[in-house]
Image (spheres, rainbow, N blue to C red):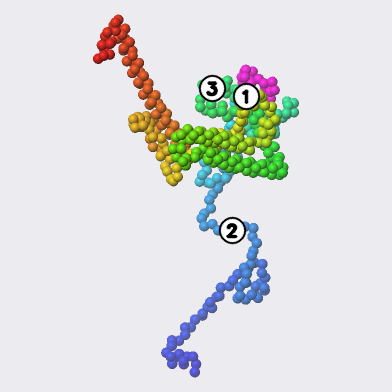
Amino acid sequence: MTSADIRDVFELPPPEIGNKQKSKTPTERRPEGISRELYSLLGENSAPLAIYQKKFKEKPKVSHKAKNWVRQPFSISSRKDDFTLHHWVLKSEVDSEASYKFEKFNVPLFIIDYTDEEYQNYLKDEDWNKDETDYLFRLCKDYDLRFFVIADRYDNEKYKKHRTLEDLKDRFYSVSRKILLARNPINSMTAAQSSLLNTMEYNKEQEVIRKKYLIGLASRTPEEVAEEEALFIELKRIETSQAKLLSDRDEVLRLLDEQKGDGGIHEYHTSAGMSSLIQDMINSQRTKNKVEEAIVSSSAPSSGVSSVLNTPTRPHALSTPRIRYGPQPTDPQFGITWHEKLHPGTFVRSQKIPAIKASLSQRVSSVMTELGVSSRLIMPTAKNFEKFVELQNSIVSLLELKRKVDRLSQETEIQDKLSRKRSASPDGSESKKHISQ
């Protein structure tokens, strides 16, 4: 049985007769650097690793069209010759009349020029002649006041003098300042001229001292730096111990100020009780003075104590001994403030404002309103509270003084009227009648 018989049994159509082209399998391109025989040995299996090909630069994959650039010539307006440069710009931005975009940063410095007459009248100096001054100003114009470059380019051999950087600065600024003052007096200067005059200030001695200190600071050895750090630590320790000593002193004085009142006031009704009270107060004051002397002597430096002990005493000094106190903790240089004794519990600082008389409260409020000050503190800090109380007390004193002045003026006016009436009637009968009425 052939295939045709089987097709007849299953009623299949006969096969199409034609030249069938074999489907071509895609062939991979042989990579460069591998021979054909070696590549055929691989068969259908691809290489396990991608072969890296060394290239100088990968070709950029740009999706948009490249922009067109042109090489455009340009000139610099600050140059007086016909010097021309070129730069690359976009073709769409080409403008032959446009100025160079970085030209705005080329701002010339303002350097004062002087005439021969001005030099003879204002700028003469024994250490500088006119030729050297002109040479200095030419260098300042050429190097745009870069004094480090000017000092490096300065020809000291030409004028047989060694000029330092401070000498050059001092001469330039002194000449510029004198010319400005000669042309425009201070009273007639504008704001711009005054600002320019202030920029011409230069203190040569201060600059020399500053550089000397900087050189000394930079030339310190590691041992000197460590010693300075140790001194700073010791200074902090002394300040801390001094603050603790002052707080202990305040606590001792506070305890000494407290008087014994356990027995009540009845024990002081008799003369013996009053005598004991006076004696207790005297003893308390003596103890307080001894504590102050001990604290001051312990806090004073040893050199100061030895100098005081070695000082010869005078005869009158033995009878009336004087105590030499050191710096007080209340001095502004120490920045130590003593807080007042507050009541226990939380309170508002505005409660500590002293009360004003009822007759003056309205007038004080009106005066503060005229001054533009609120009668209630918005930010009651310690300083604001102190200033507010000071202002309030000043207003009260002013009102009291005004009341007394008004009263005295009224009395004076009455006395003047009485004196005029007495002078009008010789016997004074009218004045007596007026007084009786």
Name the amino acid type tagged 3.
Ile
Circle nearer the viewer, 1 or 3 = 3
Q: Which residue is mark 1?
A: 175
- Span highlighted in magenta in the image: 113-135
Instruction: Give the CA separation, mark 1 to mark 3.
Output: 16 Å
The picture places residue 378, in percent across and down from the top left corner, at 41, 39
Tell which circle, 2 or 1, labels the residue nearer the N-terminal end: 2
Task: Work out whether 266 lies above or below 110.
Answer: below
In percent of the image, x 67 and y 31: which residue is there?
308
Q: Are circles 2 and 3 on residues that touch, CB within 8 Å?
A: no
Q: Residues within 10 Å of mark 1 (few under 14, many from 20)?
A: many
**Closer to the camera in the image, 149 or 428:** 428
Q: Secondary structure at mark 2?
A: loop
Q: Residue furthest left?
A: 437
**Closer to the camera in the image, 308 or 140:** 308
Task: Work out whether 404 lies above or below 227.
Answer: above
Name the amino acid type tagged 2.
Lys
The answer, for residue 352, to whether it is visible in the render is yes
Instruction: Give the CA separation, mark 2 to mark 3.
Output: 70 Å
Tell which circle, 1 or 3, labels the residue nearer the N-terminal end: 1
Q: Residues within 10 Å of mark 3 (few under 14, many from 20)?
A: few
Name the amino acid type tagged 1.
Val
Q: Which residue is mark 3?
A: 186
Q: Which residue is mark 2?
A: 59
Circle nearer the viewer, 2 or 3 = 3
Splitting the image into 4 quarters, where does residue 75 fall? Answer: top right
The picture places residue 399, in percent across and down from the top left corner, at 38, 26
The picture places residue 141, in percent across and down from the top left corner, at 63, 30
